[in-house]
Image (spheres, grey):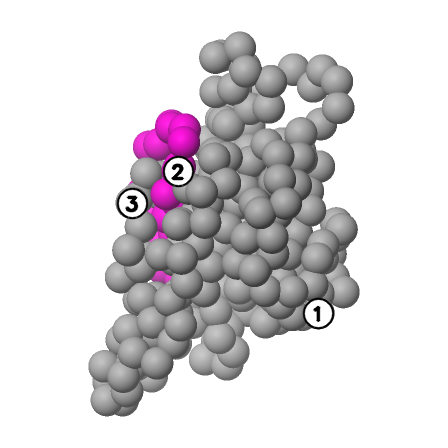
Amino acid sequence: MTQLPTFRRDGERPLLLDLFSCAGGAAMGYARAGFRVHGCDTAHRPNYPFSYHRGDALAYLAHLIATGEIQRYAFVHASPPCQHGCALTVGTNRSQGWGRAHVDLVAPTRELLDASGLPYVIEQPNGRAKIRKDLTLCGEMFDLGVIRHRNFEAGGWTVPQPAHIPHRGRVRGYRHGQYYDGPYVAAYGNGGGKPTVPELQAAMGITWTDVREELTEAIPPAYSEYIGRAFLVSRAALGVAA
């Protein structure tokens, strides 16, 4: 299991901005790492476990930069939609003859994050999303019941890459009409031997939402807890208050 860095919790906890926050998978991990969290999502998110602003994430970030309010934050996490670059979507689009109709917000997100002057991470699934893969995390690194590879681009800081641990078997479910058993559940879609909501909650380490769509969009909190602790350790090593 990947060892999480430790740090001293002196003084007020630093504030983190969670953009495209969905139901709070990333947010919960950062809170466990020692941050106060403020989210932003365009959709109504009654299950989000922290305070959040409902609205367009990029417009909100631009507003925070323009007004100087961005300086309240120590770190930014962003999970912009990039479905056209997702491996699952790319394969489906190709098989169905569909075009690249999904919106890619990675580049404009990065541009604004760089303008903010704050350290950040941009999270994306495996696929064709154009981010640097400064960090790749997998559920097996944290003894989770999902694989769920996710890539992270780190802006303004560096993050240690844990060793990838070989998978112990297959993801449970049907593939091309044949059922396979395995130690992991499929954290996407519905049907085809997909897990029940309680199974998915347990596999992801998420208990505060029972909405399947929110669970399948989330990253496990263990991922962002690792990132958050690594960031705080890096700031402490430089003698910088987070």
Residue 116 visible (yes or no): yes
**Of the residues under marks 1 and 3, which one precedes in the sequence?**
1
Q: Secondary structure at mark 2?
A: strand
Residue 221 visible (yes or no): no
Residue placed under numbered mark 2 in the picture: 154
**Region rendered in magenta:** 148-171
Q: Secondary structure at mark 3?
A: loop
Residue placed under numbered mark 3 in the picture: 132
Q: CA distance from mark 2 to mark 3?
A: 8 Å
Residue at coordinates 48% horizontally, 12% vertically from top-left?
Answer: 238
| The quadrant where residue 95 appears | bottom left
Residue 164 magenta-highlighted = yes
Q: Horizontal and vertical percent for residue 162?
A: 37, 31
Residue placed under numbered mark 1 in the picture: 44
> Within 10 angstroms of label 3, few (less than 14), some, or many (20 or more) residues?
few
Residue 9 magenta-highlighted = no
Q: Horizontal and vertical percent for residue 232?
A: 55, 24
Q: What is the quadrant of the C terminus in the image?
A: top right
Q: Horizontal and vertical percent for residue 143?
A: 50, 42
Q: Amino acid at mark 2?
A: Ala
Q: Secondary structure at mark 1?
A: loop
Q: Amino acid at mark 3?
A: Arg
**Of the residues under marks 1 and 2, which one precedes in the sequence?**
1
Asked if disc 2 and disc 3 are in contact, CB closer than 8 Å, the reply is yes
**Closer-to-camera residue (190/74):** 74
**Closer-to-camera residue (192/139):** 139
Magenta stretch secondary structure, dominant: loop
Residue at coordinates 62% horizontally, 67% vertically from top-left?
Answer: 42
